[in-house]
Amino acid sequence: MASAAQRRIKSISYAKYGYMFIAPFFLVYCFFQIWPLIYTFILSFKGNQANNAAFVGMENYSTILFGKGSSAGAAATHAEFAKALGNTFILWFGNFIPQILLSLLLAVWFTDAKVKLPGKGFFKIVMYMPNIITAASVAALYVNLFGDSKNYFINATLLNMHLVSEPIKFVTDPVNSKIMVMFIQTWLWFGNTMIMLMSGIMGISPSLFEAADIDGANSTQQFFKITLPLLQPIMVYTLVTSMIGGLQMFDLPYLFHNGANFSKELETVAVYIYYNFNKGTVEQASYGYAGAASIIIFAITAVLGSITFYMNRDKDAIAKKKQRKKAEKQMKAKMKQGGLTI
């Protein structure tokens, strides 16, 4: 009688063909993503000028994080980076919170079978359309609408209606410019977030809502007890992607002030990196500071992302996994005591 090993049919593996198909992507990814990241990491430990390849260790990090370094402008460099980091978080929080609230409200509204809203498809398309417009075009549009002088549309309208006595400085005022960037970011991305949340809600089994209706639960109770808990994976994905995009925000803050007229009140970390890397001539550029700032923002993103995933992990699944491992250990111990082997 043939043994189990003899009866086992030899399988043919086609995995190598799969690796051949995905190899071009990984080669391109390594060349355009992995190597620049590695080189940025190396650059962060070197001197600031292009012709200065000397290894300076952690001096660049010490300068921009704590203002301690051998360069004369260490304190000013630290103050500028700290302000840029604060602006980055303010602009991200300021657009993410209203964005997620508005998107969640609209997603629930559009997916509620009880709401008979005609033309839902039209409204979905209109709300998603800003997402396909480039940030440069949007910045140019809003700058020409909300310019500081009376020659721009919004200020001209407000003055003609006698709602204000002098033009409002939407662009150059530190507070107004931040509010404008937050508003534009929300307007650009809430449609995309709404579509993702709608897909998550539509993936929830309708039987859960039907059972809740039978039990007498109202819409608010269904939202907090069924919809919101089951949307957790999509919400985590939205938070992480928004955080990555928010911490790397560059185009709107930079273009909103037309580049040359840029205000430090709106400088983000990405803009700080750009200006240090493109500061005047090659001899004036601060490559080391730009590299160190890039690695710092990468580390902050990685830490915040890890914390987000850790706080939103499935605790019940983890508890069951621990119980299963504990039971397996106990079973192995009992079998070992009985002289049996697994």
Image (cartoon, rainbow, N blue to C red):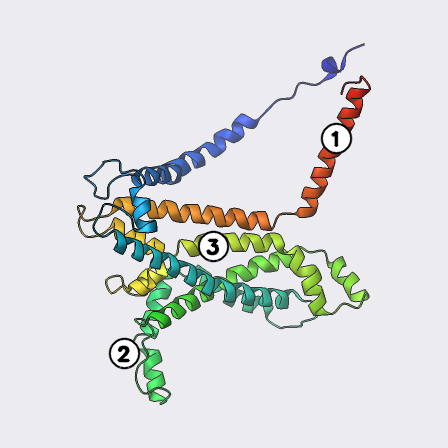
Residue that mark 2 sits on: 149
Q: Residue at x 33, y 86 (%)?
A: 159
On the rendered structure, is 131 left or right of 322? left
Which label's residue is closer to the chain start, 1 or 2? 2
Q: Which mark is residue 280?
A: none
Residue that mark 3 sits on: 243
- Residue 206 horizontal/vertical position (percent): 73, 59
On the rendered structure, is 289 left or right of 21? left
Q: CA distance from mark 3 to mark 1?
A: 40 Å
- Residue 36 horizontal/vertical position (percent): 35, 40
Residue that mark 1 sits on: 328
Q: Is residue 268 visible?
A: no
Instruction: Find out whether the residues at labels 3 and 2 contact each other: C-beta distance under 8 Å.
Output: no
On the rendered structure, is 62 left or right of 24? left
Which label's residue is closer to the chain start, 3 or 2? 2
Within 10 Å of the Cα at label 2, are there few (<14), some (14-19), or many (20+) other Cα atoms? some
Q: Is residue 86 visible?
A: yes
From this view, report whether residue 149 is shown above or below residue 21: below
Residue furthest to the top: 1
Q: Residue at x 43, y 45 (%)?
A: 299
Q: Amino acid at mark 1?
A: Glu
Q: Quadrant of residue 181?
A: bottom left
From this view, report whether residue 53 is shown above or below residue 85: above
Q: Residue at x 70, y 46 (%)?
A: 316
Q: CA distance from mark 3 to mark 2?
A: 34 Å
Q: Amino acid at mark 2?
A: Ser
Which quadrant of the figure contains the N terminus? top right
Within 10 Å of the Cα at label 1, are there few (<14), some (14-19), or many (20+) other Cα atoms? few
